[in-house]
Amino acid sequence: MYQPQPDDAPVGETYYGDAAVYASPPAPGRRRLIIVAASVVALLVGGVVVDRIAAAQAESRTAKAFQDGMGTADRPSVHVRGFPVLTQLAKGSLRHVDLTAHDIPANGSARPLPVTRLTVGLDGLKTSGGADEAHARSVDATAFLSYDDLSTALGVQVSQGDEPGRISATAGVPLAGDVTVSAAVSAATGNRIAFTDVRTVRGELLPPLKALLDKALQLPIPLENVPQGLHLRSVTTTRDGVDADFTGRSVTYRPDASSTT
């Protein structure tokens, strides 16, 4: 209900009782501060959006360069680290990029061994050069080789070994039955995986079975589908496959740039 105004009520203002609240527009100085603050926030938000767009473009370009260089069916996932990205692009080099690719094929080998999954950390990735090329100052990478892919490449059934750092290999031929051996896995020169210290675990190692296992395990198997400049440092066995750890300096991804060293 409307109440009469008290004597000290502001002239021209509607009075709604003792609990009434009087709203007045902000002072001119305060209005300017609000406008400036809103403008700064808008600029910051706009800058973040522009920077994220630049990051997405850099990620897409890196993914394309890797896919073209390594011949993967699908583009890898790429994430550019650090903020802002625009300043990194202006300098022509990204500080750190994480990349994950799957099913890198191996061609031109008597025992082609595809890389099931490759995870890569690239430092100092250059952003200049051709669209189908990417060059990094230094790289740490892990190539995961599934036991299924190893089995196909070696021609025997490969699985996790009875001890850390070892694999089991089972071979079988008609009339001779099956035999399972255990072998130590290690890094060999030339980006190859060696199988040594072969021990019979189950069955009898008859001549035809021995010949089959010698063909599979006697010579190191090369990893010919890793980027040029990566060098195999260590190999570890897991429940599902083998992890091959690489490091490298001045590493380039480009068509026909697989490692042959």
Image (cartoon, rainbow, N blue to C red):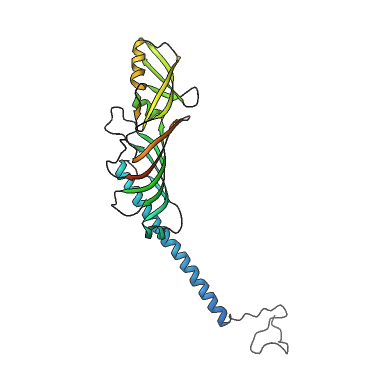
Query: Where, by quadrant of the figure, is residue 115 drawn?
Result: top left
Q: Position of residue 167 (x, y in %)?
A: 44, 24
Residue at x 67% of width, y 88% of height: 10
Q: Quadrant of the C terminus?
A: top left
Q: 75 or 51, which lies in front?
A: 51
Q: Quadrant of residue 58?
A: bottom left
Which picture quadrant has residue 140?
Answer: top left
- Above or below, 89 against 132 in this view is below
Q: Is 62 drawn above or below residue 91 in the view shown?
A: above
Where residue 205 sits in the image (x, y, percent)? 40, 12
Asked if residue 104 shows in the view, the reply is yes
Residue 76 position in % (x across, y down): 37, 44
* Residue 75 visible in the shown view: no
The percent coordinates of residue 231 (x first, y second) are 38, 37
Q: Residue at x 38, y 48 (%)?
A: 137
Total labels: the figure holds 0
- 228 vs 245, left or right, is left
Q: Is residue 259 above or below residue 23?
A: above
Q: Is residue 67 above or below residue 9?
A: above
Judge by depth and name the residue closer to the eye, 172 or 228.
228
Give the quadrant of the N terminus.
bottom right
